[in-house]
Image: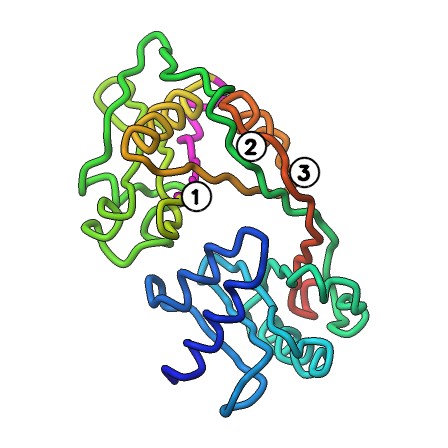
């Protein structure tokens, strides 16, 4: 209900980590799921983004942790595995034991941007970098704008993308995955045939340059084991700001 969403937003405002994917669910940017502990004056929330990310937050999570864990396990067993993050004050409630079943432990990095360390636009031989058009909304990589925006107009209005083009075709995309006010979180993808050529860096540098010119702040987050993403972010002026527990919850038949 509107009341539940409003309460979830208020509680989310107090969570001092990168929560853009949960906010996209609350704002109806994507068709995600929102659960609350009770219909009146809810105080614990669980949001699932269609890109399989999820967040648990709220002032009463400690009181209903078992109910939240049961919901997460039921979702995974019903074919909705997720990458689970919990508001830091509730991160030490033994979630792995409460949820049970197969899961793996990871770390999610929140990276902050240092404008003084940004190298500016990056040139790569044989590559032309351009701004995205509506056609790029149909990018078919593993990380696609269509998973984060309802249509091409919303994608472009949210920040669009920097596109590295080779032989007239898009080869790498650095796009706005989420936008919260002036903060824009980037999603990066390079076509398999064009990897290890610096094209993602060229696309991301162009995107960041556009964001800075528009008075916006680029945001980056990724799993710690994604060393390529971490190196790319650091080469563009990002620094690790927080390391947060991250659980990959899988169906029981995945064991």
Q: Distance between the residues labelled 2 and 3?
A: 9 Å
Numbered circles on residues, count: 3
Q: What stretch is highlighted in magenta?
A: 184-196
Say whether disc 1 or disc 3 marks the residue closer to the N-terminus: 1
SS of the residue under disc 2: helix
Q: Distance between the residues labelled 1 and 3?
A: 19 Å
Say whether disc 2 or disc 1 marks the residue closer to the N-terminus: 1
The residue beneath circle 3 is 225
Percent x, y of residue 79 = 55, 70
Most foreground residue, 212 or 135: 212
Dot in front, 2 or 1: 1
Circles 1, 3 touching at the beta carbon (< 8 Å) = no
Percent x, y of residue 246 = 67, 54
Dot in front, 1 or 3: 1
Residue 194 lies in the magenta-colored region: yes
Q: Picture quarter containing residue 68?
A: bottom right
Q: In this view, does 211 lie above or below 122?
A: below
Q: Is residue 5 above or below residue 158?
A: below
Q: Picture quarter containing residue 176?
A: top left
The residue beneath circle 1 is 185
């Amino acid at each position: 209900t509107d009341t539940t969403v409003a309460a979830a937003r208020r509680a989310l405002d107090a969570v001092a980590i990168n929560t853009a994917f949960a906010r996209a669910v609350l704002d109806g940017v994507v068709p995600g799921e929102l659960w609350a502990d009770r219909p009146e004056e809810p105080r614990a929330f669980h949001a699932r983004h269609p890109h399989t990310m999820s967040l648990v937050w709220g002032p009463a999570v400690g009181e209903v942790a078992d109910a939240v864990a049961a919901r997460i396990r039921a979702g995974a067993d019903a074919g909705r595995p997720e990458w689970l993050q919990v508001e830091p004050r509730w991160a030490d409630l033994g979630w792995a034991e409460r949820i049970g079943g197969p899961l793996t432990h990871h770390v999610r990095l929140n990276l902050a941007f240092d404008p003084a360390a940004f190298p500016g636009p990056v040139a790569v031989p044989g590559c032309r970098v351009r701004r995205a058009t509506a056609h790029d909304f149909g990018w078919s990589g593993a990380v696609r704008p269509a998973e984060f925006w309802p249509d091409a107009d919303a994608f472009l209005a949210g920040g669009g993308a920097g596109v590295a083009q080779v032989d007239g075709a898009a080869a790498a995309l650095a796009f706005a995955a989420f936008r919260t006010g002036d903060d824009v979180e980037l999603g990066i993808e390079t076509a398999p045939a064009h990897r290890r050529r610096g094209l993602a860096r060229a696309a991301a540098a162009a995107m960041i340059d556009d964001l800075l010119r528009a008075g916006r702040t680029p945001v980056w987050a990724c799993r710690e084991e994604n060393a390529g993403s971490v190196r790319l972010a650091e080469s563009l002026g990002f620094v690790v700001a927080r390391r947060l527990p991250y659980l990959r919850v899988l169906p029981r038949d995945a064991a």
